[in-house]
Amino acid sequence: MKIFLLLLLLISFDLPSQEKYGTININTEPPGAFTYIDSEFVGKTPITNLKVKPGTYTLKLKNPEISSWLEQDFVQKIEVKENDTMNLHITFEKFIKINSNPFSATILLGDSTIGTTPAIFKMKDLLGKSLKLVKKGYNDAEIFVDGKADKIEVNLTPHNGTETELRTEPKNKLNIALPIAGVSLASGITSIYFKTKADKLYDEYLKTGNPEKLNTIKTYDKIAGITLVIFEVTAIFAIYILMKN
């Protein structure tokens, strides 16, 4: 009987050892990432000797230095095997956004074009390097990526005379379009005036039958028609000048 109880006791002590586990070690750069396995929080990195049952899991690490939408969390499927040790070292990618005002400036690294503003790059690819922003009509701008900021925005300055040209062009258009618009307005008013007089004379002609009034009506109608054509042509021309690039 004693031997039987002893055997039962030994079996009960041995049962837990039958359940197999795998081991996970996780390090991140930078450290301090909140770590989840299948949505269950298991700690902050670095994590050592984490015992997990064999199987496939979703590993998620929250970026500890996430400061903008450019940074991302780490998500990956992992397979844990019994009696196996998995060592993971994860470096969170940092990104940098480069933009200019105005945009569509060419980004040069040395003599190579690497993009057009606005553009996003991996920080490690540009860290410690000088870039040049080039845009027609504007002075070149040089920037240095020191890794301290995840966004660089540059205000480009126009070449001498470019800004003056941009300012004077609309004024020149107005100087041309305004006199034409004046002619258009005057011809439109003249057309209405003679058309109104012709209509009144026609009413009188219907009452009196005086043939002299009919000749005058024809003259007024002719003047009204000519000035109406002038109005339409000059109005279209003035609009064309204002809309022309």
Image: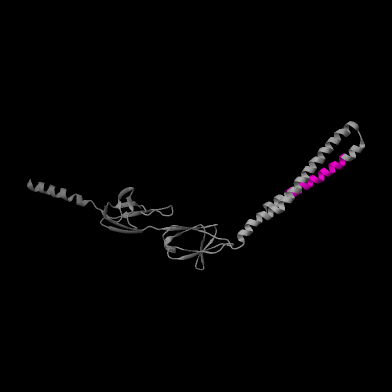
Residue 238 percent across, percent down from the top left: 72, 50
Q: What residue is at 62 percent from the left and 59 percent from the top?
A: 164
Q: What residue is at 92 percent from the left and 37 percent from the top?
A: 211
- In this rendering, the answer to whether 132 lies above or below 45 is below
Quarter location, residue 45? bottom left
Q: Is residue 78 magenta?
A: no
Residue 192 percent across, percent down from the top left: 79, 40
Total numbered badges shown on the rendered structure? 0
- Residue placed furthest toward the bottom: 111
- In this rendering, the answer to whether 210 lies above or below 146 is above
- Residue placed furthest toward the left: 2
Q: In the drawing, does residue 184 fall left or right of residue 10?
A: right
Figure colour scheme: one colour
Magenta segment, prevailing SS (helix, strand or loop): helix
- In this rendering, the answer to whether 110 lies above or below 189 is below
Whether residue 96 appears in this view of the structure is: yes
Whether residue 232 appears in this view of the structure is: no
The quarter of the picture where the C terminus appears is bottom right
Nearer to me, 18 or 176: 176
Residue 204 percent across, percent down from the top left: 87, 33
Magenta-drawn segment: 217-235
Nearer to me, 86 or 167: 167
Residue 163 percent across, percent down from the top left: 60, 59
Q: In the drawing, does residue 218 fall left or right of residue 181?
A: right
Q: What residue is at 16 percent from the left and 49 percent from the top?
A: 13
Nearer to me, 51 or 198: 198
Q: In the drawing, does residue 225 fall left or right of residue 109?
A: right
Q: In the drawing, does residue 1 fall left or right of residue 242?
A: left
The quarter of the picture where the N terminus appears is top left
